[in-house]
Amino acid sequence: MADIDTAPERARERVGSSEEQPAAWSATNGGGAEGITRRLGIVQLDAIDAAVRATEGRETTTITRADFGAPEITALMDAARYDIIQGRGAVLLSGIDISRYSVDQFARIHFGLGAHLGRAAEQSERHDRIGYVRKEPNPEKRGYLSDTELGPHTDYHGILSLASVVTSEEGGVSGFVSAAAVYDVIRRERPDLLEALEEGYYYPTGLDSVTDYKVPTFSVIDGHIGVYAYVLFIVRAAMIRGEPVPAKFVEALRFFNTVARRPELMASFTMQPGEIAYWHNFRVLHSRTSFRNTPGRERLLLRLWLHPRDHFPLAKGFYEISDILDQQHAQGFSMVGNTEELLRGAYELMRG
């Protein structure tokens, strides 16, 4: 694991502009959602259908890459892995007719395709390696179980995925933003903030402990730009340390947030039933608008967190935090915990 460059100015000099960085796409120059979409053909759909039938009766989390190992599927997911690791950082697979499948069958498709990209992680202390993203009673105020807006952010594991089962009547629009494009804008408009973003801040390792090093918001190593933007962890770390988040870093985070929300940068789209998105958590920020369910039509997506088969260099902390979470979930707890207090702290931090 490579550490962050100890000479930030030299690191920045090695990072090209958006015209030189294929990962630094925007909604205007990258074709929006269309620019990351791969439409499945009949041979791919037939191969997927055969894999579904062959795995009938199996538990979803027992499905392996070999179960969905037909050459047509392997070629598709090799192309998807290129998109995620070396291309724009995200891919949207379109064309699966979800009316042909039950939720359990579609979950096997989601898990089987994802197995080509990495190993599924447990997403909570409930040991769920495939999650259900929907509105439900949510005393811990977890975002994926609410109907509220989720601004541009990262989560914890290298590759993330959502598979759409049911759309809401209103809202629920997804957004993807290139981390490299956000970096490029900040470098042009507010270069004075990059030092704070590349230095970062401590992250929690438990309910009362933090890292002994700072985790950068932007990792810049050998021309590779990564991002870790999870403000709730920054708030928790500051609480544990008993100190305010440094003022310059707060200023930088606020500007980072406004840039990431710019419409010209964000590819916005409503995932249709049967569509599956995979993206690199540290290359692409993701978001969701609020939504409204109606009787008989309740928004539902399936979720995967994956440890990638392929890596690019990232600063210390990016993958280490996910390993810590895995250990906690295996033990039946999580430092994410009840987020209500953290949400208040994050609101105050970002809004002032």
Image (cartoon, grey):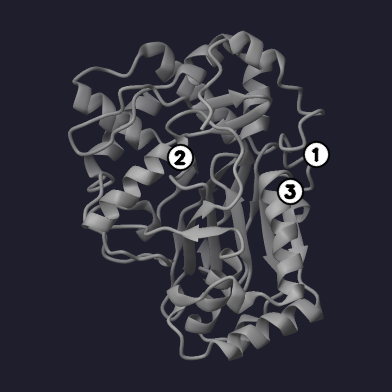
**Looking at the rendered structure, which numbered label has been put on residue 257?**
none
Is 175 displayed left or right of 134 in the figure? Answer: right
Residue tagged 3: 32
Is 157 displayed left or right of 221 in the figure? Answer: left
Distance from disc 1 to disc 2, alpha carbons, whole Å, reads: 30 Å
Q: Decide if residue 133 is in sight here.
A: no
Asked if the residue under mark 3 is in contact with the one under mark 1, i.e. CB atoms within 8 Å, the reply is no
Could you tell me which secondary element the residue under label 1 belongs to? loop
Residue type of the residue flagged with mark 2: Tyr
Mark 2 Cα within 10 Å, few/some/many (few <14, many 20+)? Answer: some
Asked if the residue under mark 2 is in contact with the one under mark 3, i.e. CB atoms within 8 Å, the reply is no
- Residue in the picture at 24% in, 53% down: 140
Asked if residue 12 is positioned above or below residue 161 in the image, the reply reads above
Q: How many marks?
A: 3
Nearest to N terminus: mark 1 or mark 2: 1
- Residue in the picture at 57% in, 86% down: 101
Distance from disc 1 to disc 3, alpha carbons, whole Å, reads: 8 Å
- Residue in the picture at 21% in, 22% down: 241
Residue tagged 2: 319
**Looking at the rendered structure, which numbered label has been put on residue 29?**
1
Residue type of the residue flagged with mark 1: Asn
| Labels 1, 2: front one | 2
Q: Decide if residue 296 is in sight here.
A: yes
- Residue in the picture at 63% in, 25% down: 183
Distance from disc 3 to disc 2, alpha carbons, whole Å, reads: 28 Å
Is 36 displayed left or right of 117 in the figure? Answer: right
Residue 321 position, x and y percent, is 38, 39
Mark 3 Cα within 10 Å, few/some/many (few <14, many 20+)? Answer: many
Asked if residue 14 is positioned above or below residue 70 in the image, the reply reads above
Residue type of the residue flagged with mark 3: Gly
